[in-house]
Amino acid sequence: MILDKYRLDGKVALITGGSRGIGRASALGFAEAGADVIVASRKLPDLEKVAEEIRGLGRKSLAISAHAGKIEDINNLVAKVREQFGKIDILVNNAGTSPGMYTTLEVSERFWDSIMNLNLKGLFFLSQAVAGVMKEHGGGNIINVTSVAGFRPMLHMGVYDISKAGVIMATKVMAVELAQYNIRVNAVAPGNVRTRLGDSRFTVMPELEQEQVKGTPLRRIAEPDELAGAMVYLASDASSFVTGETLVVDGGLLAT
């Protein structure tokens, strides 16, 4: 049955940025599909709420406080998951940041590093660490969360745009190099989604929200739950011959 291919029974998934937004929606989607899910981010109380929701769906869960942009935290995170679950079948690199809006002439080195360390460096080295675990257990799936901003620049968010373009290339590089170990690597590129990071742009520039809605053929902003289906697809055997790809979920934004 084709629907059986979307099941994740017996799988162990690790999701960064798992306390809210796309991370939380993905965690609950994976749990509904049968996976045990570990959620990680910096704020443990928020994570514990998500972990409890996952347990309420009948799956095992663990909340781990970790900064996905720091190598020491990455290593500790992977070690804890291995200790508790023995393996990692699915990794979702969802943690990301853009702590401000600046033009090219205004960007500081500190601002650049704060974005690149989490959005790109941390993503790469967490993938590296988890891929080592996946290799030992016969394979797995890595899903990177990029953005339509990786394809089309957004006003005053140049460093974020560059980081997300880097994620798209990192996805291709890792897909090619890890395929020999039966590790597939893909990405999801959301458009405008109701998240704390996404909505922060509208707080700074209120007129931007209506502009984005008008520029999206479906004429609305997505809810995080609308990304969960794409995540389950890429994490499951339904996408068994898909690797190195970026699945755009943007309501038609890039088609205009």
Image (cartoon, helix red, strand yellow):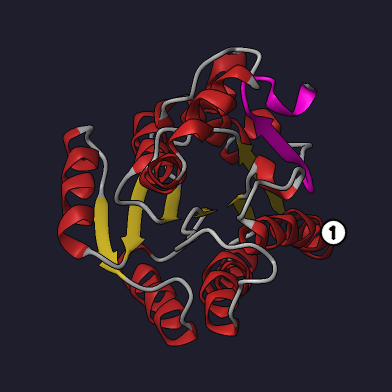
Q: Where is residue 164 in the image (x, y as percent from the top left)?
A: 67, 56
Q: Is residue 159 left or right of residue 171?
A: left
**Quick one: 54 or 7, which is closer to the camera?**
54
**Quick one: 152 or 13, which is closer to the camera?**
152
Q: Position of residue 96 (x, y in %)?
A: 49, 59
Above or below residue 71? Residue 35 is above
Which residue in the rendered view is the most extreme toward the bottom? 72
Q: In this view, does 84 lie to the left or right of 179?
A: left
Q: Where is residue 116 in the image (x, y as percent from the top left)?
A: 60, 72
Which residue is at 62% across, 29% downward? 249
Q: Mark 1 points at which residue?
A: 176
Quadrant position of residue 107: bottom right
Above or below residue 153? Residue 173 is below
Q: Where is residue 238 in the image (x, y as percent from the top left)?
A: 65, 28
**Does residue 90 belong to the magenta stretch?**
no
Which residue is at 55% across, 16% downward? 3
Q: In this view, does 99 lie to the left or right of 45?
A: right
Image quadrant occupied by the C terminus: top right
**Quick one: 35 or 169, which is closer to the camera?**
169
Which residue is at 51% across, 75% downward? 114
Q: Does any portion of residue 27 appear in the rendered image?
A: no
Which residue is at 72% across, 47% downward? 153
Which range of residues does the magenta coloring cover? 243-255
Q: Which amino acid does label 1 sit on?
A: Val
Image quadrant occupied by the N terminus: top right
**Quick one: 89 or 123, which is closer to the camera?**
123
Mark 1: secondary structure: helix
